[in-house]
Amino acid sequence: MGVRRKMALRFDLIIFTILLFASPVLSDLILSKVDRRIDLTSQIVRITSTLKVENEGSEPVSEVLLAFPDLQVKDLALLKASPHEGKGKVKSLSASLPVENVKPNGMPAALTFYAVKLPKALGKGDSYTFDVLAVFAHALRPFPEKITQADIQLVVFQESAFYLTPYVVKVQSLSVKLPESRIESYTKLENTKIHGSEIKYGPYENLPSFSYSPIVVHFESNQPFAVGQEVVREIEISHWGNVQVTEHYKLVHGGAQNKGEFSRLDYQARPTIRGASAFKYLIAKMPPRVHSVYYRDEIGNISTSNLWGDSKKTELLIEPRYPLFGGWRTAFTIGYGLPLKDFLFELEGNRFLNITFGSPMNELVIDNLIVKVVLPEGSGDISVSAPFPVNQWEETKLSHLDLTGRPVVVLQKTNVVPEHNQFFQVYYKFSKLSMLREPFMLIFGFFSLFVAGIVYMHVDMSISKSSAAYLARLQWDEVSMMCWVKFQSSMKIYTLD
Ligand SMILES: *[C@@H]1O[C@H](CO)[C@@H](O)[C@H](O)[C@H]1NC(C)=O
Ligand SMILES: *[C@@H]1O[C@H](CO)[C@@H](O)[C@H](O)[C@H]1NC(C)=O
């Protein structure tokens, strides 16, 4: 009970500030219908809203404001608006409407506003329907925060039953989809119904702007709360036919902290009861035609990973050495090769890489994602096109046989969710001649060695077997033998594909 009182207190604070600064209606827009669906079936919270806006004034309006409490905005990972397409999913990004952060005058201080630009201005009496998808990371709070191995994991989610908006709303409804397990408690208001694992609020009619009615849902969630505190993806292009991807993960179980002793015996005897919220494996969705997949941690290769798939996709099952309980950490690396022709294209003399940004891991939240694209030595005129804002800088990477180093484009983003797994492009210029530089260097190097060897042997033809010169020659033979082996193995790299 004390729990609920504490949470209610936090809400009072928000409402108080909102009421204090609530301002009159800002335009003649109204929302004639609002439908919201909240998906709480995984650790990532997704709120899809369908809004029908109507212009009741005579001035044309081309922007609609969306309002979020600041407390929620800090967890907001993605906000996307798109034209409504009947019943169904939010459309692809290409059809999205521009959304930007704005600071309208005279608005409540505890709110953050975004403006959605409509495809065309709404005249008097016109209406338009669009969808808004808001994705939140870390919006489910474990409660209690610490549990033992035998406890189930309960989480809390807070929202408003009324759609928080600067406009008047004629009719609205809300549904909250929970995982199919225990519901500890939920706020009951007028017109609250529950069907299995779905809670419905509304319909509510004719609510003034900035209406707010807090709801709290407390429920069981045993989804893996896999959080990448830092993930570094390195994508290295070799014009000899390969894109090599190496991904370093620092993972933590972001759910309720495990307290007390961990008993492996207990866990192994009854894993679904003793440690229901622990996760034993992760699934990565790899591109088709992936090859040379490996998975290792600081101890070495892990062979329990499993790869399967067909021509459209490949899935990799990653099983850490021990199940991960709340608060536990693990670090590992996965690596794989991809065919160059699937990801590298040419456009008007430029080359460009077109590959996905995020991690292939299912339902993973990444606090800090760093994507490094390593281009071949000699690349220039580099530019990046990304579908959302990212921090960007350049580095150089030196590996064997590099003279000046390879240009590296580094992209960095915080709060990454699976919806960020979109294609981005790196454009660059590269001359075909630079590509031959490395084999030429090798051939020239070994040719010089060979000539030197012949000269040496001719000079040394008549030397007795016990002389120092003979011993030196034996050593020379050994060294050149080793060089040959090295040469052959480096040539193998180039002929592999
Ligand atoms: C790990 O696996 C990779 C790829 O299969 C292999 O090249 C490497 O030698 C292995 N390393 C160890 C330490 O077994
Ligand atoms: C990148 O690849 C995706 C998937 O194949 C494709 O839909 C998209 O149009 C490509 N982007 C560019 C700029 O070529």
Image (cartoon, rainbow, N blue to C red):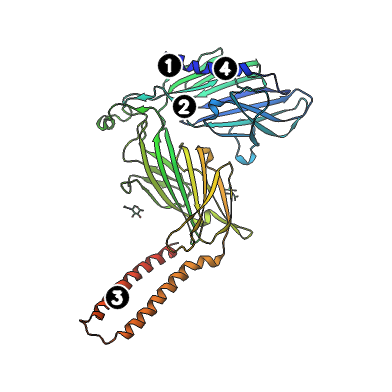
Residue behind mark 4: 15
Q: Which circle, 2 or 1, is nearer the viewer?
A: 1
In the rendered image, the quadrant that contains the N terminus is: top left
**How far apart are labels 3 and 1 at the CA level?**
79 Å
Residue 32 lies in quadrant: top right
Asked if residue 179 shows in the view, the reply is no
Spot the residue most to the right. Answer: 58
Secondary element at tag 3: helix
Residue behind mark 1: 3
In the rendered image, the quadrant that contains the C terminus is: bottom left
Place of residue 490 in the rendered image (x, y in percent of width and height, measured from the top left): 40, 65
Residue type highlighted by circle 4 = Ile
**How far apart are labels 3 and 4 at the CA level?**
84 Å
Q: Which circle, 3 or 2, is nearer the viewer?
A: 3
Label 4 crowd (10 A; few <14 / some 14-19 / many >=20): some
Position of residue 443 relative to residue 287, above or below, is below
Q: Earlier in the sequence, mark 2 or mark 1?
A: 1
Residue type highlighted by circle 3 = Asp
Residue behind mark 3: 477
Secondary element at tag 4: helix
Q: Residue at x 56, y 14 (%)?
A: 191
Spot the residue most to the front. Answer: 468
Label 3 crowd (10 A; few <14 / some 14-19 / many >=20): few
Residue behind mark 2: 140
Q: Earlier in the sequence, mark 2 or mark 4?
A: 4
Indicate left or right for 472 with 139 as reference: left
Secondary element at tag 2: loop
Residue type highlighted by circle 2 = Leu
Q: Earlier in the sequence, mark 3 or mark 2?
A: 2
Q: Residue at x 54, y 13 (%)?
A: 189
Indicate left or right for 444 with 20 as reference: left
